[in-house]
């Protein structure tokens, strides 16, 4: 992870987004010549793919291999990714035969999505990659028989649907995506996951002996977000500590509270907990606590 922090960030980030929706395996080793798939996702048939993930949800409707690249992917790397995909197909077919199960249908075999910040027009043309009406700008498909697509991240439109892929870009594209993630409502679950992983990336980059100028800019942008994360963690810790103290005080003043009342106390903000602490010093019986809660909730 310390050697290729951006690659590890991409794997961890895709895993965090997709794991609620199905099985995610990172660095999956395929038998034969030992080779690793960066991210292998198989959707849970009982879990609906959330549209909040936009283009990522569209890519993850079926079993999928994601191969993210920090720098522009080269032709040998594309061939290597496709070779790994076909090895995976053969492995899955062998497993079904070994277990005396029906061979998987063509549409059930995993697809490959190669994620690259940029890619030349000449290379796209040499691959026969074409854009499709049902897909966003910046998405290119190879022949259907090859089950391979390429997402050129820096060509994606700046829309909410493309946000989670643009976060894996470079330079201004990634910087803009980070600002968009930070602007999401605090209750958005994907926001917190992304900020946690970006915070980890910042710490790893700062520990490197040599930091590239682009990475230095990234560290500077992530610093206030990292401090926000630390502050939020401190607030949670302070709130947990205050809840425990107040419940102990209430037990001494009015007796052990019920689980229902405890839930109401724990739902109070930190400021309200401070008010309750002061008020509880004068409580004599349980009705005093209930009256206070009814008047403050």
Image (cartoon, rainbow, N blue to C red):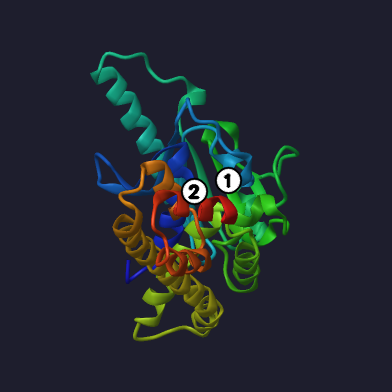
Between discs 1 and 2, the one toward the N terminus: 2
The front one of 241 and 137 is: 241
Drawn side of residue 98 relative to residue 22, left or right = left
Residue 170 vs residue 81, the one in the foreground: 170
Residue 140, relative to residue 246: is it above or below?
above
Query: In the depicted view, which residue is nearer to us: 258 or 205?
Result: 258
Q: CA distance from mark 1 to mark 2?
A: 9 Å
- Asked whether the beta carbons under mark 1 and mark 2 sit within 8 Å of each other, the answer is yes
| Residue occupying the far front of the picture | 284
* Residue shown at 50% from the left, 57% from the top: 268
Q: Quadrant of residue 278?
A: bottom left
Q: Residue at x 35, y 37 (%)?
A: 87
Residue 17, numbered circle: 2
Q: Measured along the vertical axis of the image, is residue 147 above or below residue 241?
A: above
Q: Quadrant of the N terminus?
A: bottom left
Residue 51 x/y as whole percent: 63, 40
Q: Nearer the viewer, mark 1 or mark 2?
A: 2
- Residue 123 visible (yes or no): no
Residue 223, image x, y percentages: 50, 79
* Image position, residue 32 (x, y; %): 24, 40
Q: Which residue is mark 1?
A: 56
Residue 29 can be seen, yes or no: yes
């Amino acid at each position: 992870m310390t050697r290729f922090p951006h690659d590890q960030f991409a794997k961890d980030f895709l895993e965090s987004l997709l794991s609620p929706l199905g099985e995610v395996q990172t660095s999956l080793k395929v038998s034969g010549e030992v080779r690793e798939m960066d991210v292998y996702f198989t959707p849970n048939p009982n879990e609906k793919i959330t549209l909040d993930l936009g283009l990522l949800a569209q890519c993850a409707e079926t079993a999928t291999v994601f191969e993210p690249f920090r720098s522009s992917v080269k032709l040998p790397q594309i061939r290597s990714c496709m070779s790994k995909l076909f090895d995976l197909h053969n492995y899955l077919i062998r497993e079904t035969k070994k277990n005396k199960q029906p061979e998987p249908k063509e549409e059930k075999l995993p697809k490959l999505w190669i994620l690259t910040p940029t890619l030349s027009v000449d290379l796209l043309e040499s691959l026969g990659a074409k854009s499709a009406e049902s897909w966003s700008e910046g998405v290119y498909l190879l022949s259907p028989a090859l089950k391979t697509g390429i997402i050129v991240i820096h060509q994606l439109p700046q829309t909410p649907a493309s946000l989670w892929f643009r976060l894996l870009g470079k330079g201004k594209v990634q910087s803009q995506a980070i600002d968009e993630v930070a602007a999401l409502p605090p209750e958005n679950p994907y926001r917190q996951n992304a900020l946690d992983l970006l915070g980890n990336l910042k710490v790893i980059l700062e520990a490197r002996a040599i930091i590239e100028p682009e990475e230095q800019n990234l560290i500077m942008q992530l610093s206030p977000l990292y401090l926000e994360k630390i502050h939020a963690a401190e607030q949670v810790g302070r709130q947990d500590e205050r809840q425990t103290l107040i419940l102990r005080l209430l037990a001494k003043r009015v007796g052990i509270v019920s689980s229902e009342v405890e839930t109401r106390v724990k739902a109070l903000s930190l400021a309200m907990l401070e008010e309750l602490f002061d008020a509880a010093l004068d409580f004599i019986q349980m009705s005093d606590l209930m009256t206070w809660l009814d008047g403050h909730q």
